[in-house]
Amino acid sequence: MINMFEVRETNEMIEKENLDVRTITLGISLLDCIDSDIDSLCDKIYKKITDKAKNLVSAGESISREFGIPIVNKRISVTPIALIGAPACKTSNDFVKIAKTLDKAAKTVGVNFLGGYSALVSKGMTPAEEMLIRSIPKALSETELVCSSVNLGSTKTGINMDAVRLMGEIIKETAYLTRESDSLGCAKLVVFCNAPDDNPFMAGAFHGVTEADSIINVGVSGPGVVKTALEKVRGENFEVLCETIKKTAFKVTRVGQLVAREASKVLNVPFGIVDLSLAPTPAIGDSVADILCEIGLEHAGAPGTTAALALLNDQVKKGGVMASSYVGGLSGAFIPVSEDQGMIDAVNAGALTLEKLEAMTCVCSVGLDMIAIPGDTKATTISGIIADEMAIGMVNQKTTAVRLIPVYGKKVGETVEFGGLLGYAPIMPVNSFSCDDFVNRTGRIPAPIHSFKN
């Protein structure tokens, strides 16, 4: 039972502490759309998405009004398009045609983003998967709502270094083709190691092949709520600190569970998972970095940052698991730079570097996220950064990701504005020493010894 105190407490979180349901994401399988004719395939894709998602936005708005809970985004994820397009696509331009169909469908139903322009190539690439990857720059430059992801490695299979090398070039090309909008296309492109099948967050969302025909996943976020709770226990010991984070995460996840169940009922679609991720926004008071400062750091990036983030991530997950039987996705803490005012302040103060961010990714939910770097950064350098992050995920049996934005024409010290939830970011310096000979080796890095479990 929910008592009046809990109702008032939740209202306070929503009104004063930036609690929101960041997204309800409708996952749609396109496996039954597969066709050897590209035009027929596109027709089937458009029809299925617009049919399945026709009530998604109105349902989200209705639930938001009924319960007084802000639902910021309504999104769609689809089966990785490299699989769906393989029989029909003979060139990269055929895949671009599918991307435009996805964009058209997303606009028709009124969602914010559509994810799944994706390929899973952790061990090798089929011709269709390579074609899709090579089509990404053009696809993202000629669409507005489509998001793309590529899984380059896993604990079980190792790291596909041929794909890592290729993705460095693809990110550079995407930056160039979207240079008129400060290389914004790269903000819709992420590479993964150990990508989850049920991630509701963009740009990495796709509908895994193990999922049902359609499913509702919900992503909840509440950095401001956690920070406010911690303000009340300043100076207390670690036990009190951990209990406070855990209890707060429990309350936040219950809000997500409520919305997920209601959306499932309204849309007549099975409920998948609740992803409790402390995903920040550029709004003041909605920052993961501010939580780290409340724990006791002068700035994110100071000594002790990785330990504080590990504590935060673990307690968030423990609280979430107690609140719902179906916690999934990437649950924990995100550390995007452009979307977090506290992270931006730390970079500007000189407290936070790319290398420190990489160390923090060992214990956070995702990885190097929404980081703007100089536009003249070499493709091989980008590939080297990707390889480092993939290795962290592979060895630690966790999901890691990279969303770098080499902003065409901009240098260290300048700032880039993305707008909306994507915020703004200072251009961060990148280690300029070469890794060309390493990246240009062919093949893959084998799976670690602890992967051999059956």
Image (cartoon, rainbow, N blue to C red):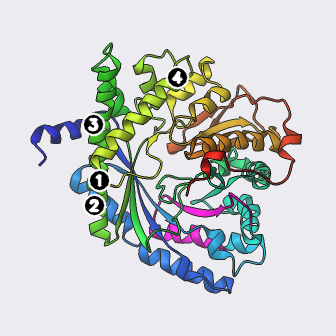
Q: Nearer the viewer's eye, disc 4 or disc 3? A: 4
What whole-number distance in Å separates the C-alpha atoms at marks 4 and 2? 36 Å
Asked if the residues shown at circle 4 and circle 1 are in contact, with their CB atoms under 8 angstroms apart, the answer is no
What whole-number distance in Å separates the C-alpha atoms at marks 4 and 1? 31 Å
What whole-number distance in Å separates the C-alpha atoms at marks 2 and 3? 20 Å
User: Which picture quadrant has residue 224?
Assistant: top left
Q: Position of residue 391 (x, y in %)?
A: 67, 42
User: Which circle's residue, 4 or 3, is located before the other in the chain?
Assistant: 3
Which residue lies under the disc numbered 2?
Answer: 261
User: Which circle's residue, 4 or 2, is located before the other in the chain?
Assistant: 2
Where 239 falls versus 400 (above or below)?
above
Which residue lies under the disc numbered 4?
Answer: 305
User: Which circle's residue, 2 or 3, is located before the other in the chain?
Assistant: 3
Which residue lies under the disc numbered 3?
Answer: 13
Asked if the residues shown at circle 2 and circle 1 are in contact, with their CB atoms under 8 angstroms apart, the answer is yes
Q: Looking at the picture, which amino acid does disc 3 mark?
A: Met
Q: Position of residue 425 (x, y in %)?
A: 61, 33
Q: Is residue 115 magenta?
A: yes
Q: Nearer the viewer's eye, disc 3 or disc 1? A: 1
Q: Position of residue 284 (x, y in %)?
A: 43, 30
Q: Looking at the picture, which amino acid does disc 1 mark?
A: Gln
Decide which of 28, 388 is in the foreground and name it.
Answer: 388
User: Which circle's residue, 3 or 1, is located before the other in the chain?
Assistant: 3
Decide which of 164, 412 is in the foreground and name it.
Answer: 164
Disc 3 residue crowd, few under 14, some 14–19, many 20+, Cα 10 Å? many
Q: Looking at the picture, which amino acid does disc 4 mark?
A: Thr
